[in-house]
Amino acid sequence: MEKTYKELAPPQRILLGPGPSNVDPRVLRAMSMPLVGHLDPYFLEIMDEIMELLRYVFRTGNRLTIPISGTGSAGMETCLVNLVGEGDEVVVGLNGFFGQRMSEIVRRCGGTPIEVKAAWGAALNVESVEKALAESNAKIVALVQAETSTGVLQPLSDISRIIKNHDALLLADTVTSLGGVELEIDQYGVDISYSGTQKCLNCPPGLSPITLNERTIEFVKDREGKIQSWYFDLNLIEKYWEADRFYHHTAPISMIYALREALRIIYEEGLEKRWAQHLEASRALIKGLNAMGLETLPTKNNLPSLTAVKIPEGVSDLNVRKTLLNDFNIEIGGGLGELKGKIWRIGLMGINACERNVILVLEALERALRKEGLSVKPGEGIAAAMEAFEE
Ligand SMILES: Cc1ncc(COP(=O)(O)O)c(C=O)c1O
């Protein structure tokens, strides 16, 4: 008999892992709107609005603030291939999985990463970044503001100040912060940044918003030789997004509709309110986890959009995640790289950063841990979290 393929019927998960997060129904509806051409006058207006709304969430006046076609890693690659050429030194912050990815891309660009290390679970310190700059010829410092692999929030302002003393550029990964965690591109002095749509923006994965200031645009234009990637060459991409709308590649129309709707939701709600919701939800979650005897990996600088929790001795990482998925329909993440099997990663991103989800995940974890033989008093985590919400 000929093979048949069933209609798609994905389960409706509660996505409390490191991303993707759940998508707002308004965003899904926007994706089903009729297609227009990528040079249609209607679409050109949408492009202008997307740039305005992205400037709003990035808190920047940067002219070149656009979505790159591709996931967060495409944004990472765009920034690095445009900045780094053969023989260039780049200071890279290495305190998690995504810093490692940046280092790898620098190497592929023919550059040399000058790695500034901190423990996975800690933020980088300003002095070690300054030392690396002083002892090298690096003109770029690349680091991750919101390290999804460790749940650490990297403070940016102090580092940015010392970078300016060395006349270098600051590149910040904001994949897990944009739209959910305090981020002020202009005020912090970030020169170039990339993000992703599938975290605090509650969009499907597929676009990478980026922003860069005039100083960085000049840096890219002044570089000798051609940018080694045609697709990610910002000199070419810029021509499609500025007044001339010179064809570069066919924009992913439905994803642009989705991003516009996601940004419109944040604009209507207010960005500061969003930041506050993420902080509130993560603080309550941590109080709940602590009351259950669980500890976060970072001892400070906890990232509001993602909490990394240490797995207690003798508890099976996989069993607990399976219980959450099978019995509660909840996805949380396991550890990456050297943290595999050592932590769980609980994401409360965008619309998911709410009281209901905090209570739900604490209840589910409590049951899963008891199933694993751990003695957790019923309701203790939830009571502590609810107290935190009431404060
Ligand atoms: C901090 C960080 N940077 C970069 C990426 C890469 O993004 P993507 O998986 O969308 O390519 C991720 C993905 O989780 C991330 O969390």
Image (cartoon, helix red, strand yellow):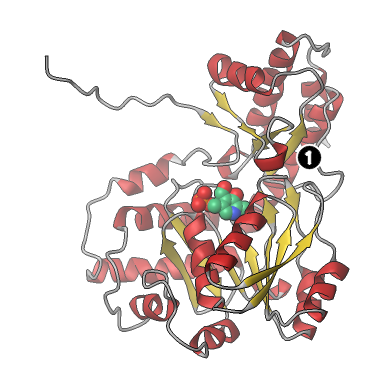
Beta carbon at label 1 within 8 Å of ligand 1? no
Q: Is residue 179 in sight in this rendering? A: no
Which residue corresponds to the image point at 70% horizontal and 30% vertical from the top-left? Answer: 341
Question: Dividing the picture into quarters, in which one does residue 131 lie?
Answer: bottom right
Rendering quarter of residue 350 = top right
Q: Name the residue under label 1.
A: 283
Residue type highlighted by circle 1: Arg
* Label total for image: 1
Is residue 377 visible in the rendered image? The answer is: yes
Q: Callout 1: few (<14), some (14-19), or many (20+) C-alpha neighbours within 10 Å?
A: many
Q: In the picture shown, does residue 72 fall above or below 235? A: above
Quarter of the image where the C terminus is located: top right
The quadrant of the image that shows the N terminus is top left
Whole-percent x, y for residue 10 in the image: 38, 26
Location of residue 114 (image quadrant): bottom right
Residue 116, image x and y in percent? 77, 64
The residue located at (73%, 40%) in the rendering is: 282
Where residue 124 sits in the image (x, y, percent)?
81, 60
Per the image, label 1 sits on a secondary structure element best described as helix
Q: What percent of the width, then of the height, locates residue 287?
A: 83, 32
Please, which residue is most extreme toward the left here?
1
Q: Is residue 41 left or right of residue 26?
A: left
Question: Along the line of sight, which residue is nearer the eye, 338 or 287?
Answer: 338
Q: Residue at x 30, y 71 (%)?
A: 44
